[in-house]
Image (spheres, rainbow, N blue to C red):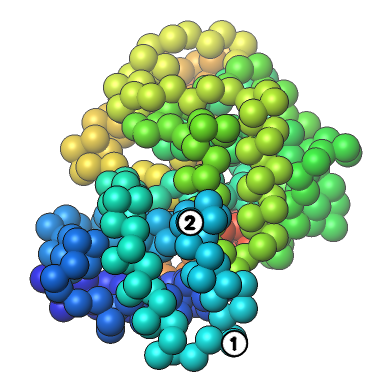
Amino acid sequence: MSAAVRAMFRNQAAGCESLGSPLTARVLTILAAAMTPGHSVEDRVLGWPGDLSRAGDALALRLAGGLHGLVLSGAAPELAAFYRAPEAVADPQATSLLLHTLRAHPAILHQWLDHPPQTNEIRRSAVLIAAGQLLTARLGLPLVLSELGASAGLNLLWDRYALDIGAQFGPKDAAIRLNPVWRGALPPDAVPQVAARAGVDLHPLDPVRDRLRALSYIWADQTERLARTRKGLEALAAYGPVVQQDDAIDWLEKRLAQPYPGRLHLVYHTIAWQYFPAAAKARGLALLEAAGARATADAPLAHLAMEADAQDHGAALTLRLWCGGAAQDIALGRADFHGRWIEWAAPSAQA
């Protein structure tokens, strides 16, 4: 199993490099080669019994999050110095430092290994803003939001962020402004009105109590992402919906059973669905189809997904809409996993 784990670490390192984190890529590459049996954390990692696939347990990112958590908490000052200036530390010294950290902090690192990462990437809200504009232009109804895998809830507040892509969408005084590289036509200029919002997660993060964990999953050399996430967590602490702890599909069943007359019920998830068990995904889709069959023009239902698929080029953006009659499938395009770019291919609002 250790060979498969090491290969997975190297593959994840390549993914981190492509997403703009050379530090995380270097850390994972070093660990892939250097981890040795006979130590608590390394034994657990190298003998990992779970899913090592691309959409599996995200083992390498669990460990990377734990190491960053040690840096952020001040518990590993030498590692923090390396993270601040990695170019000043040669690989042999970096290897020694990383192995020392694994062996000096097993209890904390085991806590991070216990749970999959929860990225809380606010830039994914750029997709949600654009989709909200499109749905509002099409249907003209206030929105009821239901987010699956909401983590701390940062992407439940997407209507409070600004999207600046040549034209500006969202509040003029928004504290968080998103400016992805945008390719394609602009979304329609129709301001969404959110009537209600709620989210669910199996292990929700509290923006105050779990602040360290939420920040730890943001890669240490991406300081702009860290600053944006800190600002979002502060907004959640001051306002923000409380994400409910529950099985996502059980919660979805209850949400779909509620009528929302005069509202569009928008169910969505961003890089979360892949972590659900296959049986849960099948049940969730069946529940959505059944609810869609009950939807009407006055109480429509939409399912928006930003998720990995068979292509290597970012995530697919898909929208399924029920307004009475047959469902409409709308391909919205593709987006970078962290929202750095969006290739918007949605049809016009009148289509």
Query: Relative to 33, is 255 on the left or the right?
Result: right
Q: Whole-Å distance between the Cαs marked 2 and 1? A: 21 Å
Amino acid type, label 1: Ala
| Label placed on residue 75 | 2
Q: Quadrant of residue 264?
A: top right
Locate the N terminus by quadrant: bottom left
Tags 2 and 1 touching, CB below 8 Å:
no
Amino acid type, label 2: Ala
Tell me which residue sits at (43%, 32%) in the image. Answer: 204
Badge count? 2
Locate the C terminus by quadrant: top right
Query: Relative to 28, is 34 on the left or the right?
Result: left
Report crowding for label 2: few under 14, some 14 to 19, many 20 or more residues within 10 A (C-alpha): some
Where does the image place residue 331, in percent across and percent down from the top left? 51, 51
Q: Of helix, strand and loop, which one carries label 1?
A: helix
Q: Is residue 263 visible?
A: yes
Residue nearer the viewer, 37 or 200: 37
Q: Nearer the viewer, mark 2 or mark 1?
A: 2
Residue nearer the viewer, 1 or 160: 1
Circle nearer the N terminus (2, 1) = 2
Q: Of helix, strand and loop, which one carries label 2?
A: loop
Query: Is 121 drawn above or below residue 340 in the view shown?
Result: above
| Label placed on residue 159 | none
Where does the image place residue 129, in percent across and percent down from the top left? 68, 41
Residue nearer the viewer, 153 or 231: 231
Where does the image place residue 258, in percent across and percent down from the top left? 44, 9
Tell me which residue sits at (43%, 22%) in the image. Answer: 244
Q: Which residue is mark 1?
A: 88
